[in-house]
Amino acid sequence: MNSLVSDRLRGIAVGAAVGDALGMPLEFGLASPPEKLITSMLPGRLPAGSFTDDTEMALALAESLLAVRGLDPADLAQRFAEWYRRNPPDVGIHTSSVLHRICTGENWQDAARGVQAKEPDSAGNGSVMRCWPAAIAAWQNENLILQFSRLQSQVTHTHEECCAGCAFVNDMLYHLICGKSLFDAYAAALREVELPEGLAQTVRLAPHRKREELRNTGWVRHTIESALWGLLNTYSFEDALIQVINLGADADTAGAVAGALAGAAYGLEAIPDGWKKTLRGEWPLRSGKIWSVKELITLADNLAGCGDPDSRKPLN
Ligand SMILES: [Mg+2]
């Protein structure tokens, strides 16, 4: 693997966690005034630089991909349930309902479908926030990325907009890893990933939105809209993330999605050192083990291509 690709793959893992941690203190708040944007990692419910459930669930997905060397939804469901049993300080309502049922012995299909059936229109951002490890694990295989992206969503979020949203974000990651620009990756994913009409319309209009139009709620459409708006109206990792997290509301999740994409576009080296140095998070939860950038880099290196049988064949 050349060093540019490796820098992009590492940039995805570190960028997502950095975006999550930057947004953490701004979650549930109002948008910052445009002349007073937050540009550093501040303490919130957790110490400054702490990542949250977005990154924790991504790490569970990453470890499942590494253990299985592919995507096994039953293994993933058990890892999410194990995380949930450790009483995470942050967990989305929909995710919590599904994982509660899995913890009481229900299989993941019935749990996920049962919760969705009670609220058929619910399409939260709980699966798109954690989907990036699938793009690293199958980075050379676009079809496999699309398949993994949708399947990892179905373990908790079965709504078509959630599954398609994960496929879209990870397809953009695929094109960015291959070296396309942000705009070209966006255009390619729009051409190649089938989106339900409502989500497709949101994705098409996102770069043209005005800041004050963005709601940035926990709806998957809003998260993808905010991330695309920030990425396609700026020219650096730093500026993209500052724009997105300062939208407030579900700031950490929009930050995580924008961070993964910006990390792939600009690479690990483009992520500001001050942010990288402050980043921290306990993983596994309640284990006392604190992760920093170093552990995320090792994870990205181990994860690269691990889920793709073709990339594991010897080259000669
Ligand atoms: Mg969170």
Image (tube, rainbow, N blue to C red):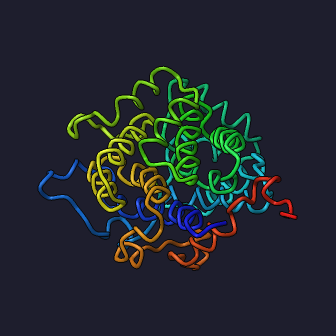
Name the residue rendered at 54%, 72% in the picture.
Answer: 282
Q: Quadrant of residue 19?
A: bottom left
In the image as oriented, which residue stretches furthest toward the top?
197
Q: Is residue 275 above or below residue 237?
A: below
Q: Is residue 262 above or below residue 267?
A: above
Above or below, 251 against 83 in this view is: above
Residue at image point 73% right, 34% down: 110
Q: Quadrant of the N terminus?
A: bottom right
Q: How many marks?
A: 0
Residue found farthest to the front: 316
Instruction: Give the x, y percent position of residue 28.
Output: 31, 50
* Residue situated in front as seen by the camera: 279 or 83: 279
Quadrant in the picture for the C terminus: bottom right
Task: Name the spot of residue 145 as percent of width and height, x first.
Answer: 67, 45
Q: Position of residue 209 (x, y in %)?
A: 27, 34
Residue at the image point whose x is 67% and y is 31% from the top: 113
- Image position of 217 (left or right of 282): left
Above or below residue 22? Residue 295 is: below
Q: In this view of the protein, which residue sits in the foreground, 13 or 176?
A: 176
**Identity of the residue drawn at 68% across and 59% down:** 82
Q: Position of residue 73 (x, y in %)?
A: 75, 45
Q: Quick one: 209 or 28, which is closer to the camera?
A: 209
Horizontal relation, residue 221 to residue 196: left or right: left
